[in-house]
Amino acid sequence: MKDCIILLLTLSTFGLMAQTEFPSLSPKGSIEQNVGITTISITYERPIARGRAIFGELVPFGKLWRTGAGNGTKIKFDDDVIIDDKVVTAGQYSLFAIPDKQEWTIILNSDAAMYGLEGYDENKDVIRFKTKVKITDRYYESFTIDIDLLEANSELNISWENTRVSFEINTQTDKHLVKMVNEEFLSGKVEDSDVLAMGADYYYFLDMELETALKLINKAIELRKVSWYYDLKIDLLTKKNRYEEALETLKTAMDYVKINPENWTEERQRSVSEGQERKMKDLLGKIRK
């Protein structure tokens, strides 16, 4: 009987051990960020400082580093991007670094299947460049990678301890959009007025391709009269310093609001009319200067 109890306890212990999963000392992390119309995906492992000196000690200066722990860091682009003024084609890469006190060397290597540094081949490096070290006020207990958005471009930050390095990843978004607008929007293939107006609005807020934006909003107004289309056209003409044309468009918009084809409440209609009056005073002031 005693032997049976011991056997049962032994089997229970082995079963418990088999089911127990200890937390990773360097937990996995991931980022998937839309940048313009490009998606950047990063998978990495996040070692924790735990009171240790990191750069120059745990991570030696002047030596190749997996940029993290375990399997290392993998970065994927679903479209071509530009890093350090060089085109990096769509695909997945291993992200390595050679840290130093004042600057790091950042490396993208085409072999994304290797574990850590095992099998690293410098001949498979796609790009190498240097970036300056920044000292941060914040202390990063765990190794951190994040992406800041810069309109249709981005900045990738690598931070640990009080150290950060950053580099820009620029997308081909603007190039693709200009091509799409010319081939689809301005050619007459797109006849959805809201889509045309949203294209104009995008260009307006980025302060780019303003003449194209005017063509888009004009096409939208030809297809359908909507109050915010007129507002956007006025804003575009004003930004181009074409105040007389903006004033004429505003007069048309004021007549449109009086008819009230969008079935606004009296309060809404009055508020819009008052805003138009203020805009007219502003435009007349600009014309007189």
Image (cartoon, rainbow, N blue to C red):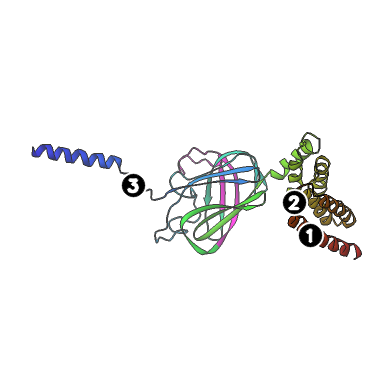
Residue 9 higher or lower than 232, as above or below:
above
The residue at 33%/44% (across/down) is 21
Q: Earlier in the sequence, mark 2 or mark 1?
A: 2
* Residue nearest the viewer, comparing 188 with 137: 188
Q: Residue furthest left?
A: 1
Residue 110 among magenta residues: yes
* Residue nearest the viewer, comparing 27 with 207: 207
Residue identified by numbered label 3: 22
User: Would you call the spot at circle 2 few (<14 residues within 10 Å), some (14-19), or many (20 or more)?
Assistant: few
Residue identified by numbered label 2: 264
Residue kind at label 3, given as amino acid type? Phe
User: Would you call the spot at circle 3 few (<14 residues within 10 Å), some (14-19), or many (20 or more)?
Assistant: few
The residue at 84%/63% (across/down) is 282
* Residue nearest the viewer, comparing 178 with 105: 178
Magenta stretch?
A: 105-134
Residue kind at label 1, given as amino acid type? Gly
Q: Would you say residue 236 is visible in this rendering?
A: yes
Q: Would you say residue 209 is visible in this rendering?
A: no
Dividing the picture into quadrants, the one containing residue 11 is top left
User: Would you call the spot at circle 1 few (<14 residues within 10 Å), some (14-19), or many (20 or more)?
Assistant: few
Q: Is the C-beta separation of discs 3 and 2 under 8 Å?
A: no
What x and y, as percent, mark residue 194? 74, 42
Q: Is the C-beta separation of discs 2 and 1 under 8 Å?
A: no
Residue 265 among magenta residues: no
What x and y, as percent, mark residue 67? 49, 50
Of labels 3 and 2, the one closer to you: 2
Residue identified by numbered label 1: 275
